[in-house]
Amino acid sequence: MSWIARLRGMLKRDRLDHDLDDELRSHVEMRAADNLAAGMSPEQANYEAQKRFGNTALLKEDTREVDVIAWLDETARDFLHALRMLRRSPGFTVVAVLTLALGIGANTAIFSVINSVLLRPLPYHDPDKLVMVWESNSQHANLHNTVSPPNFLDWQSRNTVFSSMSFIFDERDNLTGNGDPEEVVVQDISTNFFSLLGINPLLGPGFTPENGQPGHNNVVILSYGLWKGRFAGDPAIVGKSVLLNGHPQTVVGVAPRDFNWFIKDGSHTGAKPQMWSPFVFPQAFHDHKQIGRFMTVAARLQSGVTTSLAQTQMSAIAARLEQEDPDFDGHWGVNVVSLRDQISGDLRPALLILFGAVAFVLLIACANVSSLLLARAASREREMAIRTAIGASRWRIARQLLMESLLLALIGGGIGVALAVWGTNALLAASPKNLLDLRYVSMDLRVLTFTVAATLLAGLLFGFLPSYISAHSRISETLKEGGRGSSSASRRSFGRNAFVVAQLGLALVLLCGSGLLIRSFVRLIGVDPGFDTGRMLTFKIALPGSKYSADQLCITFFQQLLARISAVPGVRSASMESFPPLTGLGAATGVHLLSQPSLALSDLPVANVRVVGPDYFGTMSIPLRAGRLFNAQELAQEKHVTIINQAFADKYLRGVNPLGQKAVIYMKSDAEAENQPSEVIGVVGDVRQIGLDTAPEPTVYWPHAELVMSAMTILVRTSNDPLALLSTIRNQLQQLDPELPMAAVVTMDQLLADSLSRSRFTMLLLGIFAVVALVLAAVGIYGLIAYSVTQRTQELGIRIALGAQRRDVLRLVLAQGTRLTLLGVAIGVLAALALSRLLGTLLFGVSATDPLTFAGVAGLLAVVALLACFIPARRATRVDPMVALRNE
Amino acid sequence: MLKPKNDLLQGTLALLVLKTLARGPMHGYGMTLHIQLISKDVLRVEEGSLYPALHRMEQDGWVSAAWGISENNRRARYYHLTAKGRKQLAEEEKNWERLTQAVAHVLQFA
């Protein structure tokens, strides 16, 4: 085909049109002249010539359709026509556009989150090659266990699958000088960490390999935030010195603004880093293997190596290490996880569920608009019939109607994007801390492409059926019947009924999902955490080793601090704990009960170890189940006594009196001889350490004097609002040591709320979508019934005139709604039964097919749908027979 | 596009038009008369098919058109074959012969 000729045609469109008119006219005239010559009358001659020619308009349209220009021109004309039609019925247009905007907006908002969490490349060089390498123990559930330094060294020297490996472990250090003392999160790393990620510092040279040598590691890189905040963005910061735990460190770099490395698993601080410092392994790490597991490991795959290949080789290396040192590495394997899975792992199920939910909302919106279009098509039937009669082809009419749908979709999509921008911000504002990283969620090309695709698809989806039916209506019937009760009308009403049933079904699936999440959440908040979270202030104090070098200094400091805080008016009691509940993982170790056979360290029962201050159990309201609590002497000196929790007694001392049992708790050293056995003096109630959804773990408690720790969380039980006492308590601390910062200040209630935030967030969002779905479905069935009442006004008028009671009319109309509702509910229940399994890990204490939930939401939907039917049904009973009949 | 049921095969119409124009420039009406006459009233070209076909052939560069004056002094649009059109005509004639021969073979055989 000669496209050039067609394109040229575009430029002389008018002339062509004119030519064509002239040409056809001359043809008719010549034929008429011949007819005349053959002896016809002038009128006859003209009529015959015209008739032979048929429909000139159609012919012209056919002839012109050959052009690209013609096509574009038709489209433009369809577009303008569609615009006029939409403007002519503003009510319909507003409802349809808003419905679509809601659906498309919700999809765009959720997709933009999915895009940033699951799809967009991570902000590192060649991020698909980055993996996390964990240890994992076949006897414990944790697949992402931190790594022992000697094992890291062995992995590094033996593997051929990684081009480089880095270790990272974080801690809180005190930053002094340049202003108030401040606790900062420092990641201790190997010097190749930044080059492994492919990140160059914004300022300064960064770490060099020499910084990994002993004596050369007194250097730090600052985060952008710390540099901008504490150091006021000092452009000459590089080369200056800062005091970290009292030791001077030279600044060799500032990290780029967006740089961030936070892996929740294995993080000791649970917070994002503000500073990086190279860590040099002491000789002991190279010598033997009995070093605890406390590091996270990141690695970059060699080119051409997949994660599973790396896993295979690392498992083989782990198996050899297990043989070489069964005492330490027994049952320990390696787990290689791609960085993407590591970061998005927790969020993926919830996000995919939400994406499914918004897709449902969009489908319901489409069904609604489709149904509206069908109703409108009925009133336009005569228009279409006349257009067909004068020669418009089916395709022409279908195209016209599709154009109207697409136009609706485009306007809806445009408003939807605006809604999404607003909605995404609302989403982020409502989302729990640490769940979504604000900066990374934004619109980009991919999101817009998605939205445009969703919009066009929606337009075609809801436009297809109405335009198909209209295009296939039979002209003669329509014209004969005056636009009422034609065959396309019955097809349309079938279509509308189907849409309403589909809407109800989809809405029921969403309602079931959100009902199950609500039930889970109610179950979850009904779980007893094992202690009283009300009116309790918590904050962390970390004593710098430079000043508090001896154990006794630490003991004395904390004793004095707790005494001062307890004396503050409004404080009921105060204590402390090494790793309080709901703040993440804490220390755990193997425990050897002397009444049980001796095992290798790695085979011993494992228990959490918690170091507590005086009156800890009273302050927390943890009940004593057996035995006694620590006495004053045990709290002041090493007396080798311990209190266990119920879970420990149930799991490891079943059927035995736990009191008086002796246990070696491998906390101070890995050698049994260096760990004096502790005697169990009491059993206390269980505490949900990790979160309400995680079962209590076996735990042993030691007094602070037994294992002196320099970093403790202070717990203050108050009579009223705990935060009101904050400044008084801070004063007490500063009187004791003005250099010490108060870190992680938060109430226990807040910690509890934070631990529930993810469940609450998912529940809330799905709930919102379910309500939107419910409303749309109700509007859908309302519209259908209202329309059918209008259509049946005459019939109802006759019935009333013939003596039908209002009740009969009501029943007649409601029966139609009831049939549709029951069908929709039945289909929805079946679909929900099939789909609710997908909620899987998001549910807590509720089965995915919980009959109570299903029955409840089915009932709710049925009631709402019938109420929606009731409004038009009541209107039907008020039909005035005289008016109805006069309209005939 | 609606098609009259007794329309000629699309390819046949092009062949007939090209062949007609091989005799010299002609307007649309003339072509319908000519084809009807030569085929002894067997073939009747529908106006509804002729003009779209002419338009398409013009765009494909087989024919070109210009306004002229007809035998009885009317303004009419005259079509004439281009070089490309001649080549196309040869091609279509060959195809047609092949087709009719094939049909003839089948008829004789059966």
Image (cartoon, grey):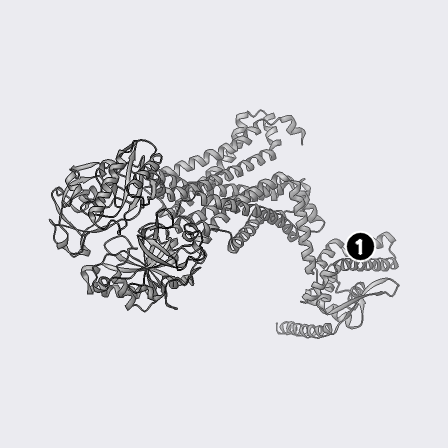
Percent x, y of residue A203: 44, 60
In terms of depth relative to the viewer, which is nearer, A65 or A496?
A: A65
**Subunit ID for the residue under disc 1:** A
Residue identifier under label 1: A50
Compared with B27, A145 (above or below) is above
Relative horizontal placement of residue A582, taking residue B104 as reference (left or right): left
Residue A337 visible in the snapshot: yes
Q: Amino acid at mark 1?
A: Gln
Q: In x, y percent, where is residue A1? A: 67, 67
Horizontal arrangement in the rendering, residue A76 relative to residue A222 (left or right): right
| Residue pictured at 80% horizontal, 54% vertical | A50
Q: With A764 as the anchor, is A94 left or right in this view?
A: right
- Nearer to us in this view, A431 or A65: A431
- Give the camera-side residue of A769 and A555: A555
Number of marks drawn = 1
| Secondary structure of the residue carrying numbered label 1 | helix
Task: Name the spot of residue A296 as percent of width and height, x first.
Answer: 31, 57
A584 over B106 or under it: above or below: above
Q: Residues within 10 Å of mark 1 (few under 14, many from 20)?
A: some
- In the image, residue A172 above or below residue A157: above
**Relative to A288, is A92 on the left or the right?**
right
Residue situated in front as seen by the camera: A802 or A331: A331
Query: Residue B10's x, y, as percent?
Result: 68, 64
- In which quarter of the view is residue A730 placed? top left
Is residue A472 visible in the rendered structure shown here?
no
- Image quarter where the C terminus of chain A lies is top right
